[in-house]
Image: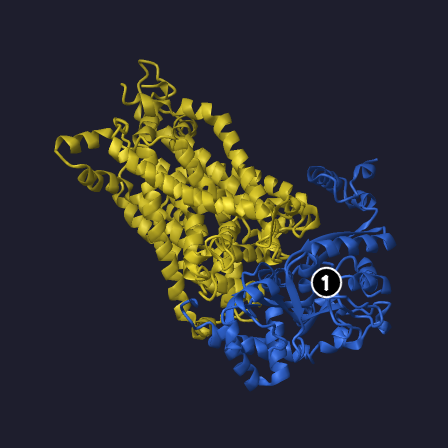
């Protein structure tokens, strides 16, 4: 047992813990947790709910500001091909989730529960797509399977449409699913597996009766995230969607192509439904989920099994190989002079100051945005998740927070961005001064990426036995102290994961911030979109590559720089079993 | 002396600017005014990066006391951004946006009419009809076809010369054009076909053309670029992008279909409610001046002031005569109806073409 599991403040031997003093401590804690919850609520209302209300006002009110009733809906639904488009969107999003979640589960299982060699390398490769702008898979797919692609015979031009969207979104969503599943598979109680073995259960039966139920929550979370990410993303289908029109692109066409904010907002409202559904199901599942790591748990350590480890090595190799090929092709695209006629290598696409998008200033701005978002976002989101998971307050407060933190996943970036313009740029808004600043970009990015970070935090927190809080409370340790001294160190890998996720996502984000940047805050990711729009695929690939390299560098620095602290804080995971 | 520290050029580091801004605010607006020797104009634009550089340099030579801050994005995004900010506009001037977009902003009452100094010399059809005009044209861009000669030879495709040629079965799946609901360039073609051929014939034409379309892109510049790489050998594009792509070395021919070309104007307007009206007017004056027209001429075959443009070796000398009749008011007031009909006809196929 390391000292971490002991309460940090030991009571003097003969101090009697009177009921009254415990009561006082609990009251003080309640005050703190409720206060923080109200703060979080205010933040989520100001930076998420009200902007959404502002943009929905466009959709639900007519020009004179009166309630428009069902008319806009009727107009939307009666527009040609609306229902087939809804079905197509659901179809391609489900297909992506059904493809990605099992693959990500296998991958996560291979990393967490087998002794495959080079696990760190596979893991790093699998998370690479997170670091790339969402246009990158589109560019790569066209260079691979397009009419002039390296493997054009394979798809014969049908990359434009369902298959293009499926493959592109699979690349883009894979690490999102993987992060959640890695977290779900990271901890397990070895005693359950010993019991299963003692009762003569085979490996398949053990998986079905022990592993699968314990990771249900993660599977569900991963499915929801992949589904909603796919259904709300317009980056991939915009490039390789062809005639396969989906809702997110329809919203893009309405807002950007025709400036019909009302229609775009209605579609945005429709895209909220999957998240609301997830929220409802999450509530149901949560009631059935127990903490896996009780304070008496023994950490499961995978044992060497050659056959299993070889099979998993092959699986990891195949998936990583596929992801790497996509990235390599995009990097290559940034170095070739004129595809496919002049294959000379050149660095001319990296001369950003002579191209659209703000040049190197945009790159520096992106760095500042990413740092701001990750530092502030990690503190807010992780603390928020902990408050929701480990403290109990008024029911309405808890459930509104829970709902608000699920909402961002479903809000298409374009809709969120427009909402920010309508709300923050309103002349009567006292927060008007934020408009056009870096702060509003940071705020918008934190909100935009809230849900995945929140889910990661939640998954990690759920694995910690609530007894820690109870024990600390009965020993009169203040709540914040338990949080800082026990919860955060126990969840340090998840905290760093969130930090990194927010950093790399804000390096690549486009859809929400495209309406919010000002001349001083142009961004690299927006530059990628502009260059691709202008048909300058080479420079777009070049800027994507630069963003990718930056994020890789930051991830590696974090890995080396903070590795020591993580190992120290996580020592209990290895010493629990040796007790 | 605080104002000596205040950065007046754009390159000064952001952190410095922020800190100094904070200090300046604390010291009150008087100090802020002192610190700002120059007026700063926020200009929204859809111009290309290299054009922005050239135009800005020339403008600042004549107006060293006015500093420009650019917000540059694609036509659709800039228009959407301007409309979304309608209650509290951030832009002072719009320099280089499609006239069809400016017409929408004008309808919303967002533009401040102004007659720039050189207005008398501007061709009447290249400015808004009102007097004083809501917007004044800079240059004209019209449709053109990019035709990849290398792929054409490989795949045995004859060179088309007219819009009608594009419906021949030999081009099945070989043509790419901008989606009219996403891109102004796409809509410009559709509206030109309808105005040239009449409703019934134009829809019949598009029915036939649709059979040959490999993909509708969501950006107006992409079709020519995709023709350049041979991804789709024929791209329905516009002349500026076509000329630029060919000059970059792409194996394409630029074809101006014989029936006539759809076109739009790139124009300048002052945003109503600007706090820097005088500076904005000086920018509008410059944009309509002979000097500026000389700059536009380097990129476009037709500029708003007659007698300036020089023939481009890649385009016919009588390029302007190829432009079809174009009624902007008709095009913008019928836009929603046309796009609904378009979507009903051509977006119904659930499956992508094999």
Mark 1 Cα-neighbour bin, 10 Å: few <14, some 14–19, many ≥20: many
Q: Nearer the viewer, residue A499 or A173?
A: A173
Depth check, front residue: A550 or A286: A550
Residue, disc 1: B96
Could you tell whether B248 is left or right of A6 in the image?
right
Specify the quadrant that holds the C terminus of chain B.
bottom left
Say if A481 sits above or below A237 in the image. Answer: above
Q: Is residue B255 above or below residue A461?
A: below
Q: Say whether residue A94 is left or right of residue A537.
A: left
In-front residue for pair A345/B55: A345
Counting from the top left corner in percent of width and height, residue B281 is at 82, 62
**Residue A30 position by quadrant:** top left
Q: Numbered disc 1: what chain?
A: B
Q: Is residue A272 visible?
A: no
Q: How is the image coloured?
A: by chain
Q: Going 75% across and 65% down the picture, which residue do you hit? A: B300
- Depth check, front residue: B3 or A101: A101
Can you say whether B197 is above or below A253 in the image? below
């Amino acid at each position: 047992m390391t000292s971490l599991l002991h309460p940090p403040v030991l009571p003097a031997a003969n101090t009697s813990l009177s009921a009254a003093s415990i009561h006082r401590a609990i009251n003080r804690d309640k005050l703190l947790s409720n206060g923080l919850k109200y703060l979080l609520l205010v933040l989520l209302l100001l930076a998420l709910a009200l902007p959404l209300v502002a943009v929905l006002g466009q959709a639900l009110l007519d020009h004179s500001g009166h309630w428009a009733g069902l008319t806009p809906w009727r107009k939307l639904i009666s527009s040609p091909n609306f229902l087939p488009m809804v079905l197509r969107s659901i179809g391609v999003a489900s297909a992506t989730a059904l493809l990605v979640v099992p693959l990500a589960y296998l991958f996560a299982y291979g990393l967490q529960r087998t002794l495959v060699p080079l696990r760190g390398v596979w893991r790093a490769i699998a998370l690479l797509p997170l670091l790339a702008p969402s246009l990158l898979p589109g560019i790569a797919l066209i260079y691979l399977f397009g009419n002039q692609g390296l493997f054009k015979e394979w798809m014969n031009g049908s990359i434009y449409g369902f298959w293009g969207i499926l493959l592109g979104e699979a690349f883009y969503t894979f690490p999102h699913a993987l992060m959640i599943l890695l977290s779900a598979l990271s901890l397990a109680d070895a005693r359950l597996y010993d019991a299963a073995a003692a009762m003569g259960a085979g490996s398949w039966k053990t998986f079905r009766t022990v592993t699968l139920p314990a990771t249900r929550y993660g599977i569900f979370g991963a499915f929801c995230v992949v589904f909603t990410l796919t259904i709300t993303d317009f980056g991939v289908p915009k490039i390789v969607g062809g005639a396969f029109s989906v809702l997110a692109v329809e919203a893009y066409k309405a807002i950007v192509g025709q400036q019909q904010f009302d229609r775009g907002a209605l579609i945005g409202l429709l895209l909220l439904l999957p998240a609301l559904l997830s929220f409802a199901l999450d509530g149901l599942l949560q009631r059935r989920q127990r903490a896996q790591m009780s304070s008496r748990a023994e950490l499961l350590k995978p044992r060497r099994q050659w056959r299993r480890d070889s099979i998993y090595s092959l699986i990891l190799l195949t998936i990583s190989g596929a992801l790497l090929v996509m990235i390599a092709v995009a990097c290559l695209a940034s170095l070739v002079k004129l595809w496919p006629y002049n294959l000379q290598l050149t660095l001319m696409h990296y001369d950003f100051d002579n191209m659209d998008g703000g040049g190197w200033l945009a790159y520096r701005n992106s760095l500042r945005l990413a740092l701001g978002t990750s530092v502030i976002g990690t503190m807010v989101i992780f603390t928020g998740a902990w408050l929701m998971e480990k403290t109990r307050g008024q029911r309405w407060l808890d459930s509104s927070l829970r709902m608000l933190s699920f909402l961002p996943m479903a809000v298409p970036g374009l809709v969120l961005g427009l909402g920010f313009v309508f709300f923050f740029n309103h002349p009567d808004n006292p927060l008007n001064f934020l408009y056009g600043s870096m702060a509003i970009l940071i705020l918008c990015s934190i909100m935009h990426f809230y849900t995945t970070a929140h889910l990661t935090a939640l998954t990690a927190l759920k694995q910690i036995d609530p007894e820690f809080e109870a024990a600390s409370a009965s020993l009169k340790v203040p709540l914040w102290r338990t949080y800082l001294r026990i919860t955060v160190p126990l969840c340090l890998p998840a905290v760093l994961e969130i930090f990194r996720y927010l950093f790399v996502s804000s390096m690549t984000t486009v859809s929400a911030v495209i309406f919010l940047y000002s001349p001083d805050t142009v961004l690299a990711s927006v530059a990628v979109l502009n260059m691709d729009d202008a048909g300058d695929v080479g420079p777009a690939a070049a800027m994507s590559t630069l963003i990718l390299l930056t994020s890789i560098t930051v991830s590696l620095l974090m890995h080396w720089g903070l590795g020591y602290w993580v190992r120290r804080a996580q020592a209990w995971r290895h010493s629990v079993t040796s007790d | 002396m605080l104002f000596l520290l205040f950065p007046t050029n754009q390159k000064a580091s952001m952190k410095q600017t922020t800190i100094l801004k904070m200090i300046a605010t604390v010291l009150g607006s008087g100090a802020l005014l002192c610190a700002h020797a120059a007026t700063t104009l926020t200009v929204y634009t859809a111009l290309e990066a290299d054009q922005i550089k050239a135009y800005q340099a020339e403008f600042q030579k004549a107006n060293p006391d006015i500093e420009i801050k650019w917000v540059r994005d694609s036509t659709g995004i800039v228009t959407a951004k301007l409309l979304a900010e309608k209650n509290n506009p951030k832009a002072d001037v719009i320099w280089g946006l499609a006239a069809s977009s400016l017409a929408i902003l004008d309808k919303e009452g967002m533009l401040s009419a102004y007659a720039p100094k050189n207005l008398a010399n501007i061709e009447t059809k290249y400015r808004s009809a009102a007097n004083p005009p809501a917007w004044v044209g800079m240059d004209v861009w019209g449709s053109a076809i990019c035709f990849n000669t290398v792929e054409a030879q490989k795949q045995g495709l004859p060179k088309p010369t007219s819009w009608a040629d594009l419906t021949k079965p030999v081009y099945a799946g070989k043509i790419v054009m901008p989606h009219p609901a996403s891109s102004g360039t796409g809509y410009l073609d559709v509206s030109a076909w309808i105005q040239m051929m009449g409703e019934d014939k134009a829809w019949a034409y598009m029915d036939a053309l649709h059979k040959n379309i490999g993909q509708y892109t969501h950006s107006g510049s992409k079709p020519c670029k995709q023709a350049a790489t041979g991804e789709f050998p024929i791209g329905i594009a516009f002349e500026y992008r076509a000329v630029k792509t060919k000059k970059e070395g792409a194996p394409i021919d630029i074809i101006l279909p014989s029936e006539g070309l759809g076109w739009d104007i790139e124009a300048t307007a002052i945003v109503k409610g600007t706090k820097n009206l005088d500076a904005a007017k000086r920018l509008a004056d410059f944009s309509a001046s002979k000097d500026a027209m000389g700059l536009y001429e380097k990129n476009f075959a037709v500029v708003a002031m007659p007698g300036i443009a020089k023939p481009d070796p890649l385009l016919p000398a009588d390029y302007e005569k190829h432009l079809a009749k174009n009624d902007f008011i008709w095009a913008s007031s019928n836009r929603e109806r046309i796009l609904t009909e378009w979507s009903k006809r051509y977006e119904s196929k659930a499956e992508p073409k094999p």
